[in-house]
Image (tube, rainbow, N blue to C red):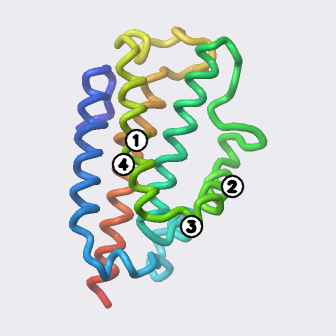
């Protein structure tokens, strides 16, 4: 499916990828759940996240924290308080450091708690998206605080696109586990 450009497509893609991700998670074996992620032997996997996340909990927490960024950003700006999407001291060039802080913050979070947090935040994101019209989500210059983009692109990035990222990572881990 191409990147959503309408509210209807956004909602469909978010729900479909959420379901696909959850099906993939339910099919993870005990070995896959208990084996730490290790992508060090794959030269193509150079981005920091391939080293950062070590298990399913880390992935779910990452998704949850990005949901929180969106929920807080939209809520604060709608109340008239200007706030950037990426909170200080981070920015779009240093958000990788922010992701590491999210990872550190949740090293004592259980997998069960991470699942609950992720499921609730996904639901909250869809509820929030549902409050906006198609025009509010996908027309430029509706909200000054969105900058040169459209609000809907943030919803796409934190849902369906991020869920794709999570599924790719889990499938790569499954493939690694089969090699052993």
Earlier residue among tags 1 and 4: 1
Earlier residue among tags 2 and 1: 2
Q: How far apart, in angstroms, are the residues tagged by discs 3 and 2?
A: 11 Å
Say few, some or many: other residues with alpha carbon within 10 Å of mark 3 (under 14 / 14 to 19 / 20 or more): some
For residue 114, side relative to residue 96 (left or right): left
Q: Dot 2 corresponds to which residue? A: 97
The label on residue 120 is 1
Q: Of residues 77 and 179, which is closer to you in this image?
A: 77
Q: Dot 3 corresponds to which residue? A: 52
Q: Nearer the viewer, mark 1 or mark 4?
A: 1
Residue lying at 40% horizontally and 41% vertically, measured from the top left? 120
Q: How far apart, in angstroms, are the residues tagged by discs 3 and 4?
A: 17 Å
Q: Quadrant of the C terminus?
A: bottom left
Q: Of residues 4 and 26, which is closer to you in this image?
A: 26
Earlier residue among tags 4 and 2: 2
Earlier residue among tags 3 and 4: 3
Query: Where is residue 145 drawn, in percent x and y?
Result: 63, 18
Assess whether mark 2 and mark 3 are in contact (beta carbons under 8 angstroms): no
Query: Where is residue 167 drawn, in percent x and y?
Result: 32, 57
Residue lying at 70% horizontally and 40% vertically, measured from the top left? 91
For residue 69, side relative to residue 150 (left or right): right
Q: Dot 4 corresponds to which residue? A: 163
For residue 31, side relative to residue 100 (left or right): left
Residue lying at 52% horizontally and 9% vertically, measured from the top left? 142
């Amino acid at each position: 499916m191409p990147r959503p450009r309408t509210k209807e497509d956004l909602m469909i893609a978010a729900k479909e990828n959420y379901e696909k991700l959850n099906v993939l998670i339910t099919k993870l074996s005990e070995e896959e759940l208990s084996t730490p992620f290790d992508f060090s032997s794959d030269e193509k996997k150079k981005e920091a996240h391939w080293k950062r996340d070590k298990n399913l909990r880390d992935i779910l927490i990452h998704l949850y924290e990005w949901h929180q960024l969106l929920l807080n950003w939209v809520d604060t700006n709608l109340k008239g308080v200007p706030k950037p999407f990426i909170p200080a001291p981070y920015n779009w060039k240093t958000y990788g450091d922010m992701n590491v802080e999210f990872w550190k913050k949740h090293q004592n979070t259980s997998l069960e708690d991470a699942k609950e947090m992720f499921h609730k935040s996904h639901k909250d994101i869809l509820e929030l998206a549902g409050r906006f019209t198609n025009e509010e989500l996908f027309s430029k210059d509706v909200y000054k605080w969105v900058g040169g983009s459209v609000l809907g692109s943030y919803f796409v990035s934190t849902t369906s696109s991020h869920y794709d990222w999570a599924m790719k990572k889990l499938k790569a881990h499954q493939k690694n586990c089969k090699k052993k």
